[in-house]
Image: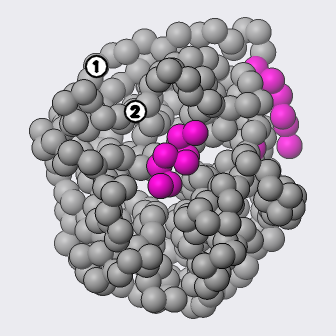
């Protein structure tokens, strides 16, 4: 179960004393008017658009294949749109329906990346959920982890090479640029991936949960990462390492720079990332005991990776939006009565 595994990375600077022990201030909470099913939960993939609408994927971990609808929720908690998953449109079978990363488009539309029957598809939706069409990406088919769309329509895709063996899970990272028609333009070799793959081969439990774990668990540094389009037009691709590693990549596939953003403790791993202005906000999570988990929220300079603000033990849920201009973050979580709960916090 990806969500469960995700919840249990230039300058690697520890937070300065001035940045430590700050406290988040809760501004308000709203709840989605439509409650989730008894077993449904959230992926830690939430994000927001320029209208402050929140997008989050819902799924039932007890189903295989599980439906993975993407919800679009406005600031008042109203469900504005629902973007269907491949289970509905492609009739996914058992073992074929993996996590379907999504990306927001400039016109308000949404694209989703799916893997089915040894092919990868990118499906495009109108802003309010209507299916517009789909394209097939050039081989190879991978277990998808992240998707981002550049301003010129080029796409960055990242994930794990697929293995047909039931006893061996692939751990090789795959990152590439595709053109708007789905043709493979350039495969990327990122400097830290080989080291992570060696760690997986050595049985490092930070990145690997054994040969019989689900395909995405073959390399949690990749599958547990995130990708966001920055205001500078580059994609920021995060690997789940500690410190968090962020590769800033152009639409031509050039590696512009590599950032390293450290949490208060090296034992914490990044679980979500959002961009705002020239800052990057990262939520880190550590081990849990008796329902209490060590966590940290770090806001860093997206040009250097240096910590700007740090909030230990913030207990905020999944990070969905960061607004540098208004110094506010938005999070999504599940309330006690099983509704999607949106909270806004001041980060001044």
Which residue position is annotated with label 2?
331
Image location of residue 1, percent across then percent down: 47, 55
The residue located at (21%, 66%) in the rendering is 129
Q: How is the image coloured?
A: one colour
Could you say which quadrant of the image residue 145 lies in? bottom right
Q: Residue at x 72, y 68 (%)?
A: 171
Q: How many marks?
A: 2
Rendering coords of residue 258 (x, y %): 79, 50
Residue sticking out furthest to the left: 33
Q: Is residue 233 above or below residue 93?
A: above
Relative to 217, 303 lies left or right: right
Rendering quarter of residue 132 = bottom left
In the image, 110: left or right of 89? Answer: right
Give SS at disc 1: strand
Q: Secondary structure at mark 2?
A: strand
Picture residue at 48% right of the left edge, 14% below the top = 24
Tell me, yes or no, if residue 273 can be seen here: no
Kindly tell me whether residue 3 is visible in this rendering.
yes
| Distance between the alpha carbons at the discs numbered 1 and 2 | 11 Å
Q: Position of residue 76 (x, y in %)?
A: 18, 34
Q: In the image, is 298 to the left or to the right of 246?
A: left
Give neighbour class at mark 2: few <14, some 14-19, many 20+ (Cα, 10 Å).
Answer: many
Circle on res. 160 = none
Q: Please, is residue 70 above or below residue 325 in the view?
A: below
Q: Which of 268 and 179 lies nearest the eye of the viewer?
A: 268
Observer-nearest of 114 and 97: 97
Q: Which residue is mark 1?
A: 28
**Start-end of magenta stretch:** 1-15
**In this rendering, is residue 28 above or below 7?**
above
Counting from the top left corner in percent of width and height, residue 235 is at 62, 58
* Residue 243 covered by magenta stretch: no
Asked if 304 appears above or below 131 in the picture, the reply is above
């Amino acid at each position: 179960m990806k969500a469960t595994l995700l919840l249990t990375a230039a300058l690697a600077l520890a937070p300065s004393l001035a940045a430590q022990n700050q406290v988040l201030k809760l501004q308000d909470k709203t709840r989605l008017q439509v409650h989730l099913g008894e077993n449904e939960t959230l992926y830690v993939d939430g994000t927001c658009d320029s209208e402050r609408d929140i997008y989050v994927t819902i799924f039932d971990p007890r189903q295989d294949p599980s439906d993975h609808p993407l919800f679009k929720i406005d600031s008042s908690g109203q469900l504005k749109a629902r973007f269907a998953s491949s289970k509905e449109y492609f009739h996914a079978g058992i073992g074929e329906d993996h996590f379907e990363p999504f990306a927001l488009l400039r016109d308000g539309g949404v694209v989703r990346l799916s893997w089915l029957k040894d092919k990868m598809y990118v499906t495009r939706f109108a802003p309010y959920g209507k299916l517009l069409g789909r394209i097939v990406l050039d081989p190879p088919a991978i277990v998808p982890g992240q998707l981002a769309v550049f301003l010129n329509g080029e796409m960055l895709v990242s994930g794990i090479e697929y293995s047909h063996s039931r006893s061996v899970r692939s751990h090789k990272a795959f990152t590439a640029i595709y053109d708007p028609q789905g043709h493979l333009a350039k495969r990327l070799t990122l400097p830290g991936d080989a080291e992570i793959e060696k760690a997986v081969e050595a049985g490092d439990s930070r990145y690997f949960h054994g040969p019989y774990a689900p395909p995405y668990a073959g390399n949690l540094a990749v599958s547990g990462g995130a990708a966001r389009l920055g205001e500078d037009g580059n994609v920021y691709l995060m690997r789940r390492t500690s410190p968090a590693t962020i590769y800033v990549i152009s639409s031509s596939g050039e590696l512009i720079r590599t950032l390293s953003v450290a949490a208060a403790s090296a034992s914490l791993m990044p679980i979500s990332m959002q961009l705002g202005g020239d800052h990057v906000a990262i939520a880190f999570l550590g081990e849990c005991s008796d329902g209490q988990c060590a966590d940290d929220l770090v806001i860093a300079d997206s040009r250097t990776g240096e910590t700007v603000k740090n909030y230990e033990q913030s207990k905020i849920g999944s990070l969905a939006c960061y607004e540098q201009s208004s110094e506010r973050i938005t999070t999504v979580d599940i309330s006690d009565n099983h509704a999607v709960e949106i909270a806004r916090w001041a980060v001044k």
